[in-house]
Image (tube, grey):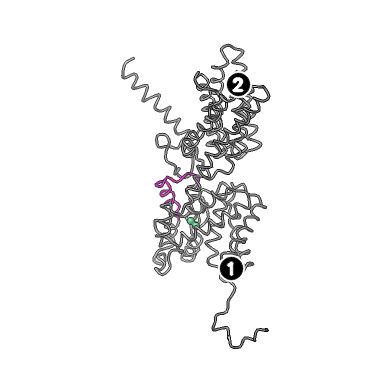
Amino acid sequence: MSRSLIQQFLSHVLRPVLVRLLRWTERKGPLPSPRTSVFLHREIHVPTPVVGVAVWVLLSAVLFMELGPGIGPLTAVLILTTGLVVLFRLYLHHDHPELMHDDDAIALIGVLVVSAALGMDLWFHQINLSPFGFPLAAASILVTVLLHARMGVVLTLVLSLLFGILNGFSLDNALVACFSGMAGVSLSLRVRTRRDLTVACLGSAGGGAAAVLMLALLKQWPPAHVVGTLKWVLAAGGFSVVAVVALLPLLELCFSRLSTIRLLELSDVNHPLLKAMSLDAPGTYHHSLIAASLAQAAAERVGANALLCRVGAYFHDIGKLAKPEYFVENQGAIGNPHELLPPNMSRIVIQSHVKDGLALAQKHNLDRAIADFILMHHGTSRVEYFYRRAIEQTDVTQEVDEDLYRYPGPKPHSKETAIVMLADSVEASARTLENPSPQRLVDHVDRIVDSKIADGQFESVPLTLAEVAAVKDAFVNSLIGIYHTRLHYPTSQETNLEKRPARPT
Ligand SMILES: [Fe+2]
Ligand SMILES: [Fe+2]
C-alpha cells in the first residue's frame, strides 16, 4: 500500500469518523463545561446504552477466557452476563431512577466493574498471590463514597459473585469478598476525611477476617491455613487504602462526582476565590455566607445534599468579582455606577456575572457540580429592576424585549441547585425589608418562592409541594434568627436609677 493511500485513508476515512465520534460523545449543554479536559481538551460524554453494551462485552470476555473454550461455556457466560446487566438495570429503575439518565454515574459503575473483573483475572493467575489479597472492597468503598451506599451494597454482591466464579465457583471466596465489601460499605457511610477512608478500608479487612474465622470454624481449617488466609485478607485492607486514596480524586475528576472529602476541601473559606471575594466584594461575600446558611438548613429539611448546597452557595456569585462595584451589596459609600448607564447596558453588566463566574470556575478548576450553581442560580429569571427601568424610560409606542432582560440559564435541574436559587433570592431581597417581623418574613419567603415557581424556573426540579413548604419553613426559621428586630434594651439614660423602687429585703 502506497504512502499516499495511507494518508488518504487517514484524512478521508479515519479522521471524519473520529471527529464524528467525539462530537457525538461530547456533552451537550447551553454553555461550555467548566471541567478541565480528560481527553483532547473535551469533556467526554458516553451514553448509558454504550456503557451497558461495553460492560456486557468486556465482562463476557473476561469470564469466557476463564471458563471457556467451547459453545457451552460461551452460552453460559452470555446468559450470566446478560442476566446481571438486565437485573442491574431493573434495580436502577426502581431504586435509583435519578441515575438512569446520569451517564457519568453509569460510566463510573461500568469502569469499576470491568476494572475489578480484569484485575481479579490478572491477580488470580499470579501463583505467588492469594486470591484473598485482592483489594475488591476498594470498588465497594469508592461507589459508596461517590454515588450511594445502596449502590455500594449491590456492587459488592455482584463483585463477590464474580470473585467466587473466577475462583472455581468457590462459595468460600465469595463469602469472604462479600463480608469484606459490606464492612467497607457500612464504614464509608459517613466518610468526611482521608482518615475515615483509611478506617473504612482497614475495617473491610476486619469484615473479611470475620468471614475467614467463620469458615475456619465451620470447615475446621488447619491453623496454618487460617493464619495464612488472614494475612492475605489483612493485606487486602492495606492495598484497598492505596487504591481508594489514589483513585478517588481521579474518579471525581473524570466522572463529575464530588465526595464529602472534596466538598469539605471546597468549603474552606481560605479558598483563593472566597478570599478574593472577602477582600474585593465583601458585600457579595457576606450575602453568599448567609445564602449558604439558608440553603444548608433547607436542604437538611428535604433530605438534599446540605454540604453541596452550602459549597454551591459559597461560589454562586464569584462572577461578581469581575465588577464588584456594579452590585448593590458592594456599593456602600462609593455610589451607584448604574446611574450613569442606560438600563440596557446595566442589564448586560449584571447578566455577565454568570459568564464571568463560569470563566473563574474554569480557571480555578472548580468541579462541574459547583459550576452548575453559578450557571443555574438565576435560571432564566428576569433582571427585574432594570427591566422595569427600561419600561419606564421607553416610549409607550415601543416595546422592551423581555427576553433580553432574562439570564441565559439553564434552569435548576436538581433539588440542590433549586434550593440555592431560592436562598439567593430570599436573602438578597430580605435585606431590603423594613422592620422584618416574623409574619413579614413568612409573607416575603412565600412571595419569592411562589414567584420563582410561577415563572417556570422549577420545571426540571424533583421537589414536591410538601418539600417546597418545608424549604419555605426552613428559610423563615433561619431568617427570623438573622434579621428579626432585636429586643429593645433600655439605655442607661432611659432608665432613671434613682427612681427605682427599693428592693425588698
Ligand atoms: Fe447572582
Ligand atoms: Fe447571589
User: Which of disc 1 and disc 2 is earlier in sequence?
Assistant: 2
- Determine the secondary structure under disc 1: loop
- Picture quarter containing residue 160? top right
Give the alpha-carbon distance from disc 2 to disc 1, as whole Å. Answer: 65 Å
Q: Find residue 35 and report its horizontal and vertical position in percent.
A: 44, 42
Residue 34 in the image: state x and y as whole percent.
44, 44
Q: Nearer the viewer, residue 433 or 503?
A: 503
Whether residue 363 is in magenta: the answer is yes
Magenta span of residues: 351-369
Q: Amino acid at mark 1?
A: His
- Compared with 132, 385 (above or below) is below
* Residue at the spot of label 1: 484
Work out which quarter of the rendered image holds the C terminus and state it.
bottom right
Hey, what amino acid is under mark 2? Ile
Front one among 316 and 29: 316
Mark 2 nearby-residue class (10 Å; few <14, some 14–19, many ≥20): some
Q: Secondary structure at mark 2?
A: helix
Q: In this view of the protein, can residue 32 be seen by the observer?
A: no
Towards the viewer: 440 or 497: 497
Q: Is mark 2 within 8 Å of ligand 1?
A: no
Q: Which numbered disc covers residue 165? A: 2
